[in-house]
Image: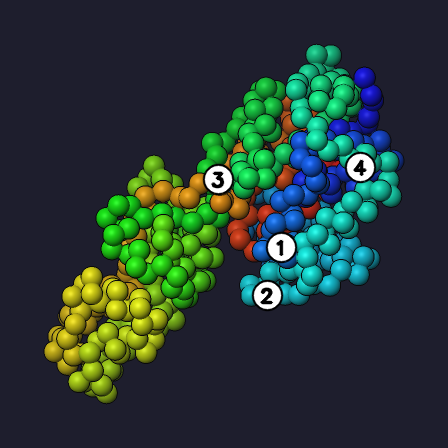
Amino acid sequence: MTYFDVLIIGASASGLMCAIEAGKRGRKVIVLDHAAKAGKKIRISGGGRCNFTNYDVSAEHYLSQNKHFCKSALSRYQYYDFLTLLADYKIPWHERDHGQLFCDRSANDIVQMLLSECKKYPVTIQLGAHIKSVENHSGDDFQINASTGHYQAKSLVIATGGLSVSKMGASDFGLRLAKQFALNVISTRPGLVPLTYNVKDSKRYKQLAGIALEAEISYGEQRFKENLLFTHKGISGPAVLQISSYWLVEMGKAIHIKLLPDLDLYDWLLQQQIQQANLLVKNILAQKMPKRLVEGLCYLYAIDKPIKQYSVSELNDIADVFQHWQFWPDATEGYRVAEVTVGGVDTHDLSSKTMQAKNVNGLYFIGEVVDVTGHLGGYNFQWAWSSGYTAGQFV
């Protein structure tokens, strides 16, 4: 039995950050992970460039049963703290739309930075470690039986992530462990994930695959204005990924799509009826939207006459086709391609100040395994850094 002050399960973004912070405090730390490489999800994120944070980090960009829970950790470690760390390693980065920050070169820069930080302190990283059992019979130290050995630790940190990106070896281990120690788990679902067509819509819209344009997509009170991408299976793109985290398949409600979100299409069509009276409506619409999209929708809705032949009421109906489009998804594409997991360990069972379980002394949950899910745009990595940092101050 090898003793450590802190044992972290998961060499993830949050797990490595926690290890660094605990190591700074002189704690003897070991990180166990079943993978062959540390930070596997970091390496593939952001198209290999890692959208590591955002300039606009606030609680409103996170989903949780307890919307205030994330505030404490996010205030303890903010985006500029991470930028300071990047500066220490001279890692170049750039800003994209909506305050998203990416590496100039590779996401691997982030992983190597975190591993280099771990080497500065008493932190051991053991890869290829499969956890067989976790016990806490005495109510004091934790005993962990793994394929790489037997360990004992005063503090146990679960940083195993969620169910998303299953090809990276994602599992429900952290959720099962939470239940083992009598913590509540909020039911999970894929988030930041493409939505699929039902059988009827697949026949109608699959010819639109490959078309991308800006749209405003809304579901309930949530709305996002970003790119929409039509695929062979359904709809994707940033706007769809954002709204997917809110969509509940069991509710069976429609998602509303507004093309040309910055234009009052009805008013514009009335103007065109005067200015371009002899043109076909589809040719007029093609001045504002991809021609293949216009032709596809006009064919479906039998919009095939010159604009002068339509009444004011009919022009309003045409505008509705493009700006009040109701889409009933059949499902999501699932955890296989989902970027995050919505749901997880119930935040009501955790301390927002320490990330420790309220009913189990020394047991901590951080990162994606917790019921805190960020929007697209670097928010989930910032939650990983912040929650990992926070736990690292107390383990």
Q: CA distance from mark 4 to mark 1?
A: 28 Å
| Residue 96, disc | 2
Q: Residue at x 65, y 43 (%)?
A: 40
User: Looking at the image, is mark 2 or mark 4 earlier in the sequence?
Assistant: 4
**Chain-order first, disc 2 or disc 3:** 2
Q: Position of residue 87 (x, y in %)?
A: 79, 60
Q: Give the mark nearer the N terminus: 4 vs 3.
A: 4
Which mark is in front, 4 or 3? 3
The residue at the point 29 percent across, 46 percent down is: 198
Q: Residue at x 49, y 41 (%)?
A: 336
Quarter where residue 46 is shown: bottom right
CA distance for labels 2 and 1 = 15 Å
The residue that disc 3 covers is 335
Amino acid, disc 4: Ala
Q: Residue at x 44, y 41 (%)?
A: 334
| Dot 2: element | loop
Check the image and name the residue furthest to the bottom: 275
Give the answer, above or below, for where 207 lies relative to 121: below
Q: Quadrant of residue 147?
A: top right
